[in-house]
Image (cartoon, rainbow, N blue to C red):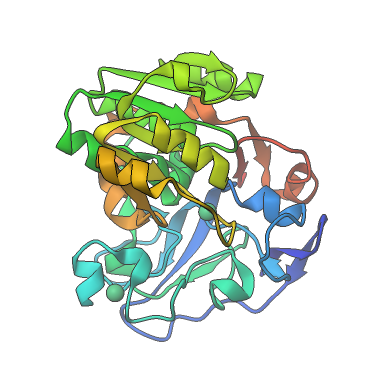
Amino acid sequence: MRSLVLEDTRRLAWHDVPDPERRHEREAIVRPIAVATCDLDQPMIFGQTPFAMPIHLGHECVAEVVEGPDRFAAGDRVVVPFQISCGTCERCRRGLTGNCASVAPLSMYGFGALGGDWGGMLSDLALVPYAEAMLVPLPDGVDPTVVASAADNIADGWRAVAPALAEQPAADVLVVGGRGSIPLYAIDAALALGAASVTYVDTDAARLAVAGELGAKVVEGKPEHSLGAFPVTVDGTATPEGLVATLRLTEWGGRCTSIGQIAPEGTLPLFELYTRGVQLHIGRAMARPAIPAILDLVAADRLRPQLVTSATIAWDDAADALLEPATKLIVQRS
Ligand SMILES: [Zn+2]
Ligand SMILES: [Zn+2]
């Protein structure tokens, strides 16, 4: 079968690799039909991440089942979460499917050696080791290209606001953008979950336009003190300075979620956080538990991830198209 490989910085090529084989009843073989770029894919392609190459790219997809446990029929459409999880270990049962104890730490598709030998979703076939635990059936009528990113980035945006809004319903939410699609998906999720308002801060005109279309109040610029204080905040800057700025815009007793950091270190205003009782959550998304609620809201037309999509491209054009910077590309098999 063919698989798209990031061989080196800016060097993508289709490789012929052996088909995955189903060796256990619990496994499934799937055929990706719509693959979304993750906010980390282009940084990997452009050599801006520490992840070792080669990397079989792609880890957000909707796929068709080719062969799997009895519960699935050939041709069933499913979202394949990017993290490998068994569904039965103590961590998985607590919803920590990104920390599954049955597989090596950080086991996931599409990250090369960092995530283990699971391959990428820009491939003709992929092996799903725990099909019943991982695969989430697509509701009737939902377009695979709309929800391909539910496997990772939409779920990431969701978890950045859902727990906080469960704790503080109808709160005013601040989302600080700065890169990628996840902060935009957080806007969509917050409004679907009943946030009173979402304020979105960024310097990028294209992302600000999408944020406005999603229903956010947009502020062009940096996360300045003059914005006020918000009970629920999301740091989508992926920088230590952005995190500190977002924490300072979090209300006394409020909750800030940082969607990601690859900086090895940073300084936090600890005494200020202590005195104001600000909660900070920093950590990877746990994709699998968020996916069913996301699919239901898309089916009900209450989430609109399609507004975040920059372009949909043909499968055979992926090697060239992924070199053009974009917020969210969807690669569609014809
Ligand atoms: Zn990702
Ligand atoms: Zn597990």
Q: Is residue 26 in sight in this rendering?
A: yes
Query: Which one is in front, 236 or 27?
Result: 236
| x and y, in percent, of residue 129 in the image | 39, 75
Q: Is residue 7 above or below residue 46?
A: below
- The one of 53 and 222 positioned closer to us in this rendering: 222
Q: Position of residue 78 (x, y in %)?
A: 38, 53
Query: What is the quadrant of the N terminus in the image?
Result: bottom right
Marks counted in the figure total 0
- Identify which residue, 11 or 43, lies in the foreground: 43
Horizontal side, residue 302 vs residue 167: left or right: right
Which residue of the protein is positioned furthest toward the bottom in this rendering?
23
Picture quadrant of residue 143: top left
| Ligand 2 visible in quadrant | bottom left
Q: Residue at 68%, 67% (x, y): give it.
A: 55
Residue 214 shows up from this direction:
no
Q: Quick check: 331 above or below 130?
A: above
Position of 33 with respect to 319 (left or right) is left
- Which residue is pictured at 76% across the width and 57% down the height? 47
Q: Position of residue 102 (x, y in %)?
A: 33, 81
**60 lies left or right of 205:** left
Q: Quadrant of the C terminus?
A: top right
User: Residue at image x 62%, y 76%?
Assistant: 113
Expressed as whole percent of the image width and height from the top left, the position of residue 119 reads: 58, 70
**At 41% across and 33% down in the image, what residue appears?**
248
